[in-house]
Protein backbone atom coordinates (compact mmCIF):
# COMPACT_ATOMS: atom_id res chain seq x y z
CA UNK A 1 0.00 0.00 0.00
CA UNK A 2 1.54 3.38 -0.95
CA UNK A 3 2.30 5.77 1.85
CA UNK A 4 1.24 9.40 1.85
CA UNK A 5 4.05 11.89 1.91
CA UNK A 6 3.63 14.36 4.72
CA UNK A 7 4.13 18.07 4.20
CA UNK A 8 5.51 19.80 7.27
CA UNK A 9 2.72 21.55 9.17
CA UNK A 10 -0.17 19.92 7.26
CA UNK A 11 -2.04 16.63 7.51
CA UNK A 12 -1.85 14.17 4.57
CA UNK A 13 -5.42 15.00 3.57
CA UNK A 14 -5.24 18.80 3.94
CA UNK A 15 -3.60 20.77 1.13
CA UNK A 16 -1.28 23.61 2.10
CA UNK A 17 -2.83 27.08 2.04
CA UNK A 18 -2.51 28.89 -1.30
CA UNK A 19 0.31 31.39 -1.67
CA UNK A 20 -0.62 35.02 -1.93
CA UNK A 21 -0.55 36.38 -5.46
CA UNK A 22 1.43 39.35 -4.15
CA UNK A 23 4.18 38.71 -1.62
CA UNK A 24 6.57 41.56 -0.82
CA UNK A 25 7.27 41.24 2.93
CA UNK A 26 10.35 43.48 2.94
CA UNK A 27 8.64 46.19 0.90
CA UNK A 28 5.54 45.85 3.07
CA UNK A 29 7.53 46.71 6.19
CA UNK A 30 9.22 49.60 4.38
CA UNK A 31 5.88 50.89 3.04
CA UNK A 32 4.22 50.72 6.46
CA UNK A 33 6.98 52.84 8.03
CA UNK A 34 7.46 55.32 5.19
CA UNK A 35 3.73 55.67 4.46
CA UNK A 36 2.92 56.65 8.02
CA UNK A 37 5.78 59.16 8.07
CA UNK A 38 4.78 60.62 4.69
CA UNK A 39 1.23 61.17 5.90
CA UNK A 40 2.46 63.54 8.59
CA UNK A 41 5.66 65.01 7.13
CA UNK A 42 4.83 65.21 3.41
CA UNK A 43 1.19 66.21 3.73
CA UNK A 44 -0.21 62.98 2.32
CA UNK A 45 -2.87 62.81 5.06
CA UNK A 46 -4.41 66.04 3.76
CA UNK A 47 -4.51 64.57 0.25
CA UNK A 48 -6.26 61.48 1.59
CA UNK A 49 -8.90 63.69 3.22
CA UNK A 50 -9.37 65.56 -0.05
CA UNK A 51 -9.63 62.29 -1.95
CA UNK A 52 -12.39 60.92 0.28
CA UNK A 53 -14.32 64.10 1.02
CA UNK A 54 -18.01 63.60 0.27
CA UNK A 55 -17.83 59.86 -0.42
CA UNK A 56 -20.93 58.01 0.73
CA UNK A 57 -22.67 54.66 0.60
CA UNK A 58 -20.93 51.37 0.01
CA UNK A 59 -17.29 51.69 -1.05
CA UNK A 60 -14.67 49.31 -2.43
CA UNK A 61 -11.01 50.25 -2.02
CA UNK A 62 -8.32 48.36 -3.94
CA UNK A 63 -4.78 48.00 -2.64
CA UNK A 64 -5.70 49.28 0.80
CA UNK A 65 -2.15 48.77 2.07
CA UNK A 66 -1.90 49.22 5.82
CA UNK A 67 -5.16 51.16 6.02
CA UNK A 68 -3.94 54.76 5.96
CA UNK A 69 -7.11 55.88 4.15
CA UNK A 70 -9.44 54.38 6.74
CA UNK A 71 -9.52 57.30 9.24
CA UNK A 72 -10.51 59.71 6.46
CA UNK A 73 -13.72 58.01 5.34
CA UNK A 74 -16.76 60.22 6.14
CA UNK A 75 -19.51 58.90 8.38
CA UNK A 76 -21.86 58.89 5.36
CA UNK A 77 -20.00 55.75 4.21
CA UNK A 78 -22.04 52.70 5.21
CA UNK A 79 -19.32 50.12 4.54
CA UNK A 80 -15.82 49.86 3.08
CA UNK A 81 -14.67 46.62 1.49
CA UNK A 82 -10.89 47.01 1.45
CA UNK A 83 -9.07 44.58 -0.85
CA UNK A 84 -5.37 44.01 -0.13
CA UNK A 85 -3.32 41.18 -1.70
CA UNK A 86 -0.18 41.42 0.46
CA UNK A 87 -0.46 39.44 3.69
CA UNK A 88 1.68 41.65 5.94
CA UNK A 89 -0.08 44.84 4.85
CA UNK A 90 -3.47 43.13 5.12
CA UNK A 91 -2.73 42.26 8.74
CA UNK A 92 -1.90 45.90 9.50
CA UNK A 93 -5.02 47.06 7.64
CA UNK A 94 -7.18 44.73 9.70
CA UNK A 95 -5.82 46.29 12.89
CA UNK A 96 -6.43 49.79 11.48
CA UNK A 97 -10.00 48.86 10.56
CA UNK A 98 -10.80 48.09 14.18
CA UNK A 99 -10.08 51.72 15.09
CA UNK A 100 -12.36 53.25 12.42
CA UNK A 101 -15.66 55.05 12.88
CA UNK A 102 -17.08 53.42 9.73
CA UNK A 103 -17.36 49.66 9.12
CA UNK A 104 -14.33 48.37 7.20
CA UNK A 105 -14.01 44.77 6.01
CA UNK A 106 -10.46 43.91 4.94
CA UNK A 107 -10.35 40.99 2.48
CA UNK A 108 -7.65 39.23 0.45
CA UNK A 109 -7.74 39.58 -3.30
CA UNK A 110 -6.18 41.17 -6.36
CA UNK A 111 -7.45 44.17 -8.28
CA UNK A 112 -7.53 42.10 -11.46
CA UNK A 113 -10.14 39.74 -9.96
CA UNK A 114 -12.09 41.48 -7.22
CA UNK A 115 -13.89 39.05 -4.89
CA UNK A 116 -17.14 41.03 -4.92
CA UNK A 117 -20.38 41.11 -6.92
CA UNK A 118 -21.02 43.23 -9.99
CA UNK A 119 -22.70 46.65 -9.62
CA UNK A 120 -22.57 46.37 -5.82
CA UNK A 121 -20.87 49.65 -4.87
CA UNK A 122 -21.64 53.35 -4.84
CA UNK A 123 -17.98 54.38 -5.03
CA UNK A 124 -14.51 52.96 -5.57
CA UNK A 125 -11.17 54.22 -4.33
CA UNK A 126 -7.77 53.74 -5.98
CA UNK A 127 -5.04 55.37 -3.93
CA UNK A 128 -1.37 54.94 -4.89
CA UNK A 129 -2.10 51.48 -6.24
CA UNK A 130 -2.56 51.65 -10.03
CA UNK A 131 1.21 51.89 -10.36
CA UNK A 132 1.62 48.42 -8.84
CA UNK A 133 -1.18 46.31 -10.29
CA UNK A 134 0.03 43.64 -12.68
CA UNK A 135 -2.61 44.34 -15.33
CA UNK A 136 -3.80 47.96 -15.32
CA UNK A 137 -6.60 47.68 -17.94
CA UNK A 138 -8.00 44.55 -16.30
CA UNK A 139 -7.91 46.13 -12.83
CA UNK A 140 -9.83 49.18 -14.03
CA UNK A 141 -12.28 46.92 -15.88
CA UNK A 142 -12.94 45.18 -12.58
CA UNK A 143 -13.65 48.51 -10.89
CA UNK A 144 -16.04 49.34 -13.72
CA UNK A 145 -17.75 45.96 -13.22
CA UNK A 146 -18.33 46.30 -9.47
CA UNK A 147 -19.60 49.90 -9.56
CA UNK A 148 -23.23 50.78 -10.08
CA UNK A 149 -24.12 52.82 -13.20
CA UNK A 150 -22.88 56.40 -12.85
CA UNK A 151 -21.08 55.52 -9.62
CA UNK A 152 -17.88 57.35 -8.73
CA UNK A 153 -14.23 56.35 -8.87
CA UNK A 154 -11.96 58.44 -6.65
CA UNK A 155 -8.26 58.28 -7.54
CA UNK A 156 -4.98 59.57 -6.13
CA UNK A 157 -2.06 58.22 -8.14
CA UNK A 158 1.40 59.04 -9.36
CA UNK A 159 2.30 58.56 -12.99
CA UNK A 160 3.84 59.78 -16.20
CA UNK A 161 5.75 63.06 -16.02
CA UNK A 162 4.64 65.87 -18.36
CA UNK A 163 8.13 66.54 -19.71
CA UNK A 164 10.01 64.21 -22.10
CA UNK A 165 13.20 64.19 -20.02
CA UNK A 166 11.73 62.81 -16.81
CA UNK A 167 9.36 60.57 -18.79
CA UNK A 168 12.41 58.93 -20.38
CA UNK A 169 13.95 58.48 -16.94
CA UNK A 170 10.70 56.89 -15.70
CA UNK A 171 10.62 54.40 -18.56
CA UNK A 172 14.26 53.51 -17.93
CA UNK A 173 13.82 52.86 -14.22
CA UNK A 174 10.62 50.91 -14.88
CA UNK A 175 12.60 48.52 -17.09
CA UNK A 176 15.30 48.00 -14.48
CA UNK A 177 15.42 48.57 -10.74
CA UNK A 178 12.29 50.47 -9.69
CA UNK A 179 9.69 47.65 -9.70
CA UNK A 180 12.11 45.35 -7.87
CA UNK A 181 12.85 47.88 -5.16
CA UNK A 182 9.34 49.20 -4.66
CA UNK A 183 6.96 46.26 -4.68
CA UNK A 184 6.18 46.17 -8.39
CA UNK A 185 5.66 49.93 -8.75
CA UNK A 186 5.85 51.47 -12.25
CA UNK A 187 6.38 55.20 -12.58
CA UNK A 188 5.58 55.79 -16.28
CA UNK A 189 1.95 54.70 -16.32
CA UNK A 190 -0.68 57.27 -17.30
CA UNK A 191 -3.56 56.84 -14.82
CA UNK A 192 -5.86 59.42 -16.41
CA UNK A 193 -5.62 57.88 -19.87
CA UNK A 194 -6.08 54.39 -18.46
CA UNK A 195 -9.15 55.40 -16.44
CA UNK A 196 -10.81 56.96 -19.48
CA UNK A 197 -9.95 53.95 -21.66
CA UNK A 198 -11.64 51.67 -19.11
CA UNK A 199 -15.06 53.29 -19.56
CA UNK A 200 -14.94 56.13 -17.05
CA UNK A 201 -15.56 59.82 -17.62
CA UNK A 202 -13.11 61.97 -15.69
CA UNK A 203 -15.15 64.62 -13.87
CA UNK A 204 -12.40 66.57 -12.16
CA UNK A 205 -8.72 66.28 -11.44
CA UNK A 206 -5.67 68.26 -10.48
CA UNK A 207 -2.00 67.51 -11.05
CA UNK A 208 0.82 68.30 -8.64
CA UNK A 209 4.26 67.23 -7.50
CA UNK A 210 5.40 65.54 -4.31
CA UNK A 211 7.55 67.14 -3.02
CA UNK A 212 6.41 70.49 -4.42
CA UNK A 213 9.91 71.96 -4.23
CA UNK A 214 13.38 70.61 -4.78
CA UNK A 215 14.54 67.78 -7.04
CA UNK A 216 11.81 65.63 -8.56
CA UNK A 217 11.73 61.86 -8.23
CA UNK A 218 10.34 59.47 -10.87
CA UNK A 219 7.34 59.06 -8.55
CA UNK A 220 6.78 62.77 -7.91
CA UNK A 221 4.13 63.46 -10.56
CA UNK A 222 0.68 62.95 -9.07
CA UNK A 223 -2.95 63.35 -10.02
CA UNK A 224 -6.00 63.42 -7.74
CA UNK A 225 -9.59 63.47 -8.91
CA UNK A 226 -12.83 61.67 -9.61
CA UNK A 227 -14.48 59.86 -12.52
CA UNK A 228 -17.88 58.36 -13.25
CA UNK A 229 -18.67 54.96 -14.63
CA UNK A 230 -20.05 55.24 -18.17
CA UNK A 231 -22.20 52.36 -19.43
Image: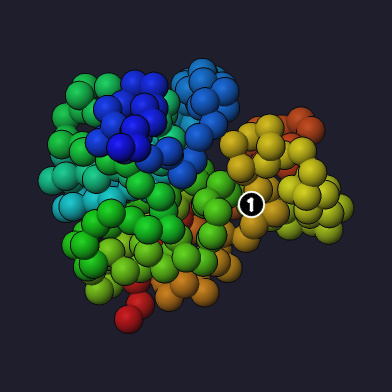
In this picture, is 220 found above or below 24? below
Against 29, residue 165 (above or below) is below
**Residue 213 sits in which quadrant?**
top right
Q: Position of residue 2 (x, y in %)?
A: 34, 37
Image location (x, y in percent) of residue 90: 36, 31
Residue in front for this viewpoint, 219 or 174: 174
State the residue position of label 1.
159
Disc 1 element: loop
**Which residue is painted at 16% across and 44% down in the image?**
79
Q: Position of residue 93 (x, y in %)?
A: 33, 29
Classify residue 116 as left or right of residue 92: left
The answer to whether residue 95 is left or right of residue 173 is left
Query: Visible in this render: residue 199?
Result: yes
Image coordinates for residue 166, horizontal then vertical, percent:
81, 49
Query: Is 111 left, or right, of 29 in this rendering?
Result: left
Q: Residue at x 63, y 34 (%)?
A: 182
The front one of 80 and 206 is: 80
Quadrant location of the N terminus in the rendered image: top left
Residue sticking out furthest to the bottom: 231
Q: Nearer the viewer, residue 95 or 24?
A: 24
Using the image as rendered, state which of residue 44 and residue 81 is in the foreground. 81
Please state, as top left, top right, bottom left or bottom right, where the C terminus lies in the image.
bottom left
Amino acid sequence: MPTLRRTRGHSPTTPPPPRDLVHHPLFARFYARVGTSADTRAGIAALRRELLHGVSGRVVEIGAGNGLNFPHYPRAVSEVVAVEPERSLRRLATAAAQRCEVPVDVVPGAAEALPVKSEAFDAAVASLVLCTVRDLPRSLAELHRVLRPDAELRFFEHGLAPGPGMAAVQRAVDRTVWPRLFGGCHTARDPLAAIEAAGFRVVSHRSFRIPERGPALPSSYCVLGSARRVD
